[in-house]
Image: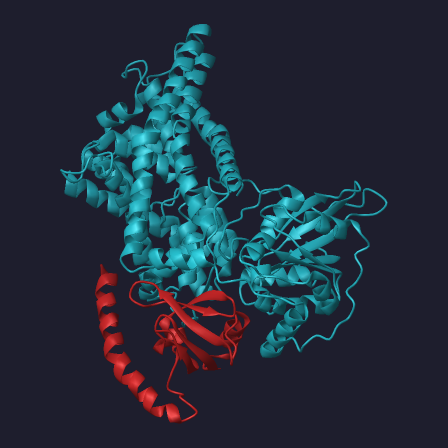
Amino acid sequence: MARKKSKKQSGALDKNFRHPHTETMLQLSSNSEELAATLVDLRRGDSATLAAIDLPGEDARRLMELGFLPGTEITAGRSAPGGDPRVFQVDGSEIALRRETARRLKVHRSSRKS
Amino acid sequence: MSECNGCPAAPVLEFPGHKGAVPPARVAVIGPPNSGKTTLFNRLTGLRQKVANFPGVTVEQHTGVAQLPDGRAAWVIDLPGVYGLSPRSEDEQIAHDVLTGQQGDTPQPQAVLLVLDATNLGRHLMLAAPILALGLPTLVILNMADDLRKRRGHVDLKALAAQLGAPVALISARQGEGLDRVFDFLAGAMPKPTPVQLPVLQDIPKCRQWAGHVGNQAGYRAPLPPKWTRRLDSVLLHPVAGVLVFAAVVIAVFQTIFNYVTPLMDGVKWLFQISGDWVAAVLPESLFRSLLIDGVWHGVGSVIVFLPQVLMLFLFIGILEDSGYLARAALIADRTMAKVGLQGKSFIPLLSAYACAVPAIMSTRTIENKRDRIATILIAPFMTCSARFPVYTLIVLAFVPNLPVLPFLSPKVLSTQTVAMIGLYALGFVMAVITARLLKSSILKSGRTPFLLEMPSYRWPTLQSLGLRLLDRSVVFLRRAGTVILLVTVVLWVAAHVPFSHGKPPALENSLAGTVGRTIEPAIKPLGFNWKIGIGLITSFAARETIIATLGAIYGMDKADEKNPDLQKAIHRDLTAGGAVALLIFFAFAMQCISTIAVVRRETAGWKWPLVQFTYMSVVAYVGAFLAFHIIG
């Protein structure tokens, strides 16, 4: 029951958040760096290149062992109901990350499937 | 531990002294999680350690003997999966310590079988760097050759061997393909690897670059993405369809158990009845006959009749685990876990606790955070284990009529019995979640660790693996019935026949067993239980399903009952509806399992946590049963 409620919430949050944010990014696209983007900003089917991991050494190391290395292309996949956690395709595997972790992974936008 | 319902006896093997002139070689199997190490280990040794399609199934070392073609033998040590050689969790620590010779009871292996997933070589080759750096003779095994072929990947083995300075074998442990290469290596001279340029091990980006380079040099073509996994996930992880599919599957399982497996159970019951009658007719009237009929036939027999249902449950669990769905279930449940402050990794042990809490508690070793791990250990016994299942089934069959839930749906599709059963399963889960919430907001607060879960590709569960699972389960179930439960029943029978007076056993009520039951009656009367149920409660602390054997034996011995008592009808006489619900709630919450207490003591290295847990669960069970009895009446 509780899940249902939060699902609605985060769905709405995502929608409100997404469009203006994406537009800003498009405007900024003349700049070479778009540091504002993180994995959380990717929607299903979006790809991006990992720029940096903003997590303590041990945690960053585990992520890197699983393929989350700077310069690697990451594609957002399906998620649990409510959008959290989400599966990311990275380096030949599918790894699920919670939103709180995905937020710490900074990316450069690379391509976007329609 | 080996007597537990959920874990088939694992052979405990010691390294023997030097029997022959040359002691057998010790070879460790290592590799990333879910790369198929245990499948290979089972192939090599003929053992049946548990395998499933999700990371973190193996959490301790297992040793077995591989018979080599030349007649010699080799010790094979199966290890938990690791991503690198810098351990973070307990299972990784074990793998690390065994490999480096720091595990006290296991001498350092003389050679290594490095198992990598051939369909994901780019990343998996990273582990080759630290393993080759150990300098031990190594065979690099690329597993899942069948998958690689099917998805049109390719790798040049000779070039890869040259790059790594170690022999390479492409196998499919699941299909048993390419195993000769592994046996040849074990039987051969096992040369040390030729030193090759390895990256700095601490520098993961460098290691990945090296792995990529090695793969390129070996002409590695990564296979196409697993099409069916994506397709299945688009349904099973769909916000609406996914939940519906899951609900439909759960309902189907319990419906099958009640509507289609119950006749099988009646068949087994009938077998016990006619064979019991036959034994009674053949043997002369004696105490021995009474022990045999009341203890074995009425007691142990009434537990064994649940075998078909328990197997059905395990078939379902087996399909979930082998297909790869379990990891998806963990993903879906993660939000709930996060709310109560636990990480998603806790969910996999909890799911496996549906079979048995003992292996579930051991598999918490994959949880890096100590406090999260203890919290998971403390809540795992609330999950409905397969020992509760026969008890639930008995009471549900006795008290819940088989009626349609919705007027337009046939009870063959959704019956009240199924709903009652699902409700009981949900009850245990809800209590686990509430307890986790309490623990994580008080004594076991901790910082968050990132949740990372690798989603395995879906695989067809093989008939062979499902068949072996069911066979192992049957053996475990019957062995338990033939040892713990039989022993308790015999003790009970003796207690029901003393003190002897005038050469005759006393009436059940005045026997030792009856006296014990009547002594505790005041304590359980508020829960709606009489002294007969009380005796069952006491014995159920040895193992939950013993209560069925106990009640079967008691009703068999009680002269007030008819000659061939039907357990369901007899229970109906002794319990009101409120009492039945109270009994179900008591069983849902109480920690009536010696194996679980022992494993919690071992895994937490002390008596503190098992005592806390036992007390807490007993109080919850008593209060819950009390409330249920008084509310329902």
Asked whether B82 or B216 is in front, the reply is B216
Query: In the figure, B199 relative to B320: above or below?
Result: below
Residue B136 rendering spot, x and y as whole percentages? 75, 63
Using residue B291 as the reference point, say whether residue B418 is left or right of it. Answer: left
Asked whether B219 or B569 is in front, the reply is B219
Query: In the figure, B398 relative to B205: above or below?
Result: above
Q: Is residue B284 visible?
A: no
Residue shown at the point (28%, 55%) measured from the top left = B241
Residue B225 rendering spot, x and y as whole percentages? 48, 62
The total of numbered circles placed on residues is 0
The colour one sees for chain A in the rendered image is red
Q: Return the residue found at the far left.
A: B407
Asked whether B345 or B320 is in front, the reply is B320
Q: Return the residue found at the far right.
A: B21
Asked whether B406 or B439 is in front, the reply is B406
Residue B54 rendering spot, x and y as whole percentages? 48, 55
Query: In the figure, B566 relative to A96: above or below?
Result: above
| Color theme of the render | by chain
Query: In the figure, A109 relative to B564: above or below?
Result: below
Using residue B151 as the reference point, say whether residue B354 is left or right of it. Answer: left
The colour one sees for chain B in the rendered image is cyan
Residue B612 rendering spot, x and y as whole percentages? 39, 54
Residue shown at the point (57%, 57%) measured from the top left = B148
The quarter of the picture where the C terminus of chain B appears is top left
Q: Is residue B403 visible?
A: yes
